[in-house]
């Protein structure tokens, strides 16, 4: 018969390593500038790296939130049609983070997006919670 220590050791081996904690999860402030009728989000790639999400998913969310069209240029910057303040883009990224990155149960960013039966779910690798997202 296997003892408690054996089961505990096995559970610890199967628990994923959590690379970031909530305290170290720091999304960079958007570095934006106007270029004619376009807002250029200079550090879009840095934001994606911290969020750990696909550029198309984040860009589509920004387009929906800001009511505009956008694309990613050859330098990896997001180019948003229209004039948007740094604060407005920051608010949109914060909404994205709350909806698609932070766990609704424990608040940690150690999550993955998963498709299941046509629904997009947020699965937390820290606490194991699963929650539906809005899209």
Image (cartoon, helix red, strand yellow):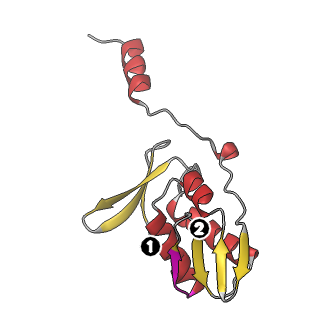
Kindly identify which numbered label has been placed on residue 37: none
Q: Which label sits in the foreground, 2 or 1?
A: 2
Report which residue position mark 2 lands on: 77
Percent x, y of residue 108: 58, 48
For residue 115, above or below residue 8? below
- Is 59 in front, or is 21? 59
For residue 134, above or below residue 123? below
Place residue 121 in its image quadrant. Answer: bottom left
- Tell me if 50 is positioned left or right of 33 in this view: left
Percent x, y of residue 107: 59, 52
- Is 8 in front, or is 68? 68
Would you say residue 68 sits in the magenta stretch? yes
**Residue at 70% across / 66% down in the picture?**
30
Report which residue position mark 1 lands on: 134
**Residue at 64% across / 88% down in the picture?**
82
Percent x, y of residue 2: 30, 12
> Circle 2: is it few (<14), some (14-19), or many (20+) Cα within 10 Å?
some
Q: Secondary structure at mark 2?
A: loop
Q: Earlier in the sequence, mark 2 or mark 1?
A: 2
Over which residues does the magenta segment extend?
67-71
Magenta-colored segment: predominant secondary structure: loop
- Tell me if 77 is positioned left or right of 127 in this view: right
Residue 26 in sight in this render: yes
Q: Residue furthest front?
A: 74
Would you say residue 114 sits in the magenta stretch? no
């Amino acid at each position: 018969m296997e003892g408690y220590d054996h089961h505990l050791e096995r559970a610890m081996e199967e628990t994923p390593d959590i690379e970031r904690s909530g305290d170290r999860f720091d999304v960079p402030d958007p570095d934006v500038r106007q270029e004619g009728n376009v807002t250029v989000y200079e550090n879009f790639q840095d934001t994606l790296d911290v969020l750990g999400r696909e550029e198309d998913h984040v860009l589509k969310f920004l387009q929906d939130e800001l009511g505009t069209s956008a694309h990613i240029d050859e330098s990896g910057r997001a180019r948003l049609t229209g004039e948007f303040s740094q604060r407005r883009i920051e608010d949109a990224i914060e909404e994205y983070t709350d909806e698609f990155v932070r766990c609704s149960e424990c608040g940690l960013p150690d999550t993955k997006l998963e498709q299941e039966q046509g629904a997009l779910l947020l699965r937390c690798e820290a606490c194991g919670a699963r929650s539906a997202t809005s899209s």
